[in-house]
Amino acid sequence: MGKITVGNRYSKIEGLPTPYVEEAIRRELSYQVQNYFHMPAFKERGWDGYINLLEADGLFMSGLLSLVRGVLDATKTPYEVEDVRTKSEPNFPELTFTPPPDYQERPYQKFTVDRALRFTRGILRVATGGGKTMIVTEMIGRLKVRPFLFFVLTRDLLIQAHDELERCLNAPIGMVGDGRMDIQDITVCTVQTLVACLHRNDKGFNPKDYRYDAEDVWDETKFLSEGDSERVVALMRESRGFYFDEVHHAAAKTCKEVVFACENAFYRYGGSATPQRDDGEDLVVQGLFGKKVVDISATYLMDQGYLVRGHVFLTNRDPSAEGETTYGAIYKKVVVENEDFNGQVAALVRFLTGNGVPCLLLVQQIPHGKLLKRFLPEAEYLTGRDSGKKRKKAIDRMRSGELKVLIATTLADEGLDIKPIQAVFMLSAGASVTRVPQRIGRCLRLWEGKKFGMFVYFRHRVKYLFEQGHDVQKILAAEPGFVVHKAHDFGELRQSIVKLMNSTENLL
C-alpha cells in the first residue's frame, strides 16, 4: 500500500506498487520550460525542456498533494495519508476584525473567507477590484494566530496593505521593508528585504540574481543590520501563517526562498487577479500554496455591479521596422522611440482628460515614459526607482482628482487602488500578456460618476510583437463580460471612444 506523509513544505510518497504509478505521478508533476530550445542544456545535451517536481526519494511540494492523490485515485492505487503537520491553534484570541463604517461585505467575500479557512492553504483568484486585501484582513482576524506575515513585492503595496490591516484589526501592524524594521504579531513584509536577510552573511549574494522582473529595483542602502536580519529570519521560521500577495510571482527565486523559510507556517495562502503564468511554472506556484480554492472573475463582478463595465479597444498599427532584426531593436524603433506613435497617444490622452477622463499610461522601459512625459508635461511619471514619498504623493493626487494623467512603469500593474482612473493605455507591448486582466482592472473600480472603464491595447504588426496580440485576445475571451472594440488605426480608435462616451447609457 502506498503512503503519503504530509508536511508544511514537503510531502513524501512511498510504497508504490508499480513503476507505472510512479511514472504517472512524475508526468503529472512535470512542466516544460518556456523557450527551453534556446538553452544550452537543450543545444548541448538534447534536454527535452521538462522539469520534474517529484524528487528521486519521493519528495514533492505539499501544494501538489491534490495532483498526487488524483493520480493514485485514477490508477486505483490503495494508499494512506499521515499528516505530520502541527496545526496552529488560535494563540491570539483578542484579535478581531472590524470593517470600516462604509464597508458592506459582499456575498462572494464571505464565501471566499469561509472556504479559504476551511482549506487552510490555497490560491485565491479574485479579480482586480474584488476587495482581495479586505478579504485577507478578515481571514487574519478570524484565524487569530501569531506571528502572521503578509508578503508584498513593492514599497507601494507595503504601505497600502499595512494601512488596510491597521484600519480593520485591533492590533498594531508591523512593517519590514524599505528601510523599516517594526516587527509585530501581524507584519507586512517586502520579499526583497526578507531575501536580503536570509543571505545577510552570504558574500556571493547578488540582488540582480533575484529580480522577479525588470522593475524589481533593490535599494541596497536600505538593507537591515545583521542583528535585525537575524530577528527577521527568526520571525519567518516562527510564523504560523502567511499570505503572499500577487502570488503569480511566487515561482521566482526570491519568492520561493521566502516561502520555504517559513517552515512552521500551517496556514499558507496566495492571492492574485491573474494566478496563471505564461512560462509554464503554474505548477511551482501550486506546489508552494496549493490549488486554487476560489475563482471570482471580473465578468462576475461586472455583472453583479461591483465593477463598472470594461470596454477594450484593440487597435492595429502597421509601423516600419525596416533595417532591424532583433527584438530589442524592433521594440525600440516601433514603440519606445517612435515619436509619431507616442505623439498620437498623447493627443488622444489629452482629448480624454479634457472630457474629464483620468488616464493611466503603462510603459515597460524608462526611456519610453520619458518620451511620453515630453508630450504630456502635465503628467506625473513614476518608476520603480522613485522614492516612496514621491510615489505616494502622485498616487494621492490621482486619487483626489488633482492629477489627471499618470505614466508608470510596471510598478502600477498590480495592486494599486486608484479608483478615479477611467482609461488605461497598455503601451508596454513586450511585457507579460497574462497581466492584461490586472491592467484592465485598474480602470474598473467603482467611482462617483464613472459609468465604464476603457482599456486601450495596440497590436504592432511587426515581427515578434504581432503574436502577442493573439495571446491578448485569448485572454480576453476568458472574460466574456468585456466589450471588445476593434480599430484599424488611431482615427477609428478615437471614433469608437467618442461613440462610447456619447452613448445615452454612458454619458459622463
Image: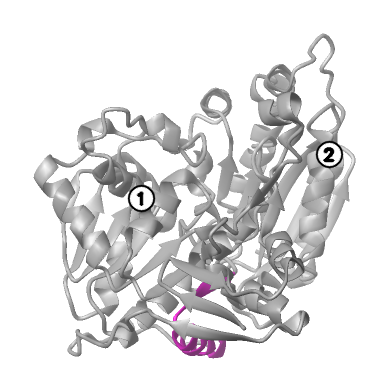
The residue closer to the viewer here, 125 or 7, is 7
The residue closer to the viewer here, 229 or 165, is 229
Numbered tag placed on residue 191 in the rendering: 1
The C terminus - image quarter: bottom right
The residue closer to the viewer here, 457 or 92, is 92
The N terminus - image quarter: bottom right
Please tell me whether residue 389 is drawn above or below residue 365 in the rendered image.
Answer: below
Give the mark toward the camera: 2 or 1: 1
Q: Position of residue 209 (x, y in %)?
A: 44, 32
Q: Earlier in the sequence, mark 2 or mark 1?
A: 1
Q: Amino acid at mark 2?
A: Glu
Residue displayed at 51% across by 27% down = 366
Residue displayed at 66% across by 61% down = 29
Dot 1: few (<14), some (14–19), or many (≥20) neighbours within 10 Å?
many
* Residue 296 appears in view: no
Find residue 96 and report its image quarter: bottom left
Please tell me whether residue 314 is drawn above or below residue 418 in the rendered image.
Answer: above
Q: Position of residue 324 (x, y in %)?
A: 79, 13
The residue closer to the viewer here, 498 or 146, is 146
Question: In the image, 50: left or right of 208?
Answer: right
Label 1 SS: helix
Residue displayed at 28% across by 78% down = 168
Q: Which residues are magenta?
A: 107-126
Say if the magenta span includes residue 118.
yes
Residue displayed at 20% across by 43% down = 179
Q: Which residue is mark 2?
A: 467
Task: Measure how far apart labels 2 and 1 are at the Cα level.
Answer: 33 Å
Please tell me whether residue 168 is drawn above or below residue 479 in the rendered image.
Answer: below
